[in-house]
Amino acid sequence: MLTSRLYYLLLFIICLSLLGFGLYLEHVKGLEPCPLCAFQRMAYIAITVIALIGTIHNPHNAFRIVYNILLIIAALIGAGVAGRQTWLQHLPPELVPECGPGLEYMLEVFPLGQALKMILSGSGECAEVHWRFIGFSIAEWSLVCFTVIVITTIVASFMLKPERRLFNF
């Protein structure tokens, strides 16, 4: 029987695997992540950390609701960023924005608010597709994964019961 603790553990393993695959594509295949890809990674890291804490804590009642809300927020943010990148990838070439400065440069030189605005608006490098699997780009797969995380977390909120605790703390 699937419990909330097992759900958090599965979510942790899946997101950790996705992050590991991203690192494989970067360090073994040489695909440098664009700024929008970096923000999607941050969303996956947030989901991974929340899921790990949920696995360890095995929350009941209010805490379980809080964890699920945090998971949904992180996944929605990731889906928004992945959706933006997917939209950029489907623009006609003449409408693709010009490439901008790198992520590190923007964060060092510009105020945080302005840097975030520049990053989330995307650039030409975010519109490039260097890898596909079954016809989907990395951003499209990421959008699918974030959407599945949101849906399964909502379903898990209503369907799954926490495990019994050995101790009440």
Image: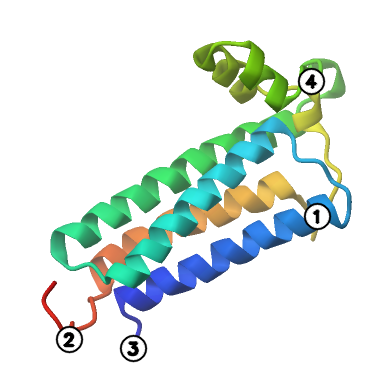
Which residue is labeled 2 in the image?
166
Left or right of residue 131: residue 122: left
Residue 31 higher or lower than 165, as above or below: above
Give whichever of discs 1 and 4 has the lower sequence position: 1
What amino acid type should be assigned to the residue bearing mark 2? Answer: Leu
Which residue bears the numbered disc 1? Answer: 25
Query: Which type of secondary structure does the marked residue at label 2 adopt?
Result: loop
Q: Give x and y (percent) for residue 31.
A: 84, 46
Give the amino acid at mark 1: Leu
- Asked which secondary structure carries label 3, the reply is loop
From the top left corner, tell me how far across and down residue 46 is, in percent: 47, 49
> Disc 3 or 2, which lies upstream in sequence?
3
Quote the CA–CA distance across marks 3 and 2.
Answer: 18 Å
Q: Dot 3, crowdedness within 10 Å: few (<14), some or many (≥20)?
A: few
Question: Residue visible at 79% across and 20% down?
Answer: 96
Residue 53 lies in quadrant: bottom left
Instruction: Tell me the mark number nearer the camera, choosing from 3 and 4.
Output: 3
Q: CA distance from mark 3 to mark 4?
A: 48 Å
**Marks 3/1: CA–CA distance:** 35 Å
Residue 96 circle label: 4
- The answer to whether mark 1 and mark 4 are in CB contact below 8 A is no
**Discs 1/2, front:** 2
Q: Nearer the viewer, mark 1 or mark 4?
A: 1
Q: Earlier in the sequence, mark 3 or mark 1?
A: 3
The residue where tag 3 is placed is 1
Counting from the top left corner in percent of width and height, residue 98 is at 81, 15
Q: Is residue 112 above or below residue 58?
A: above
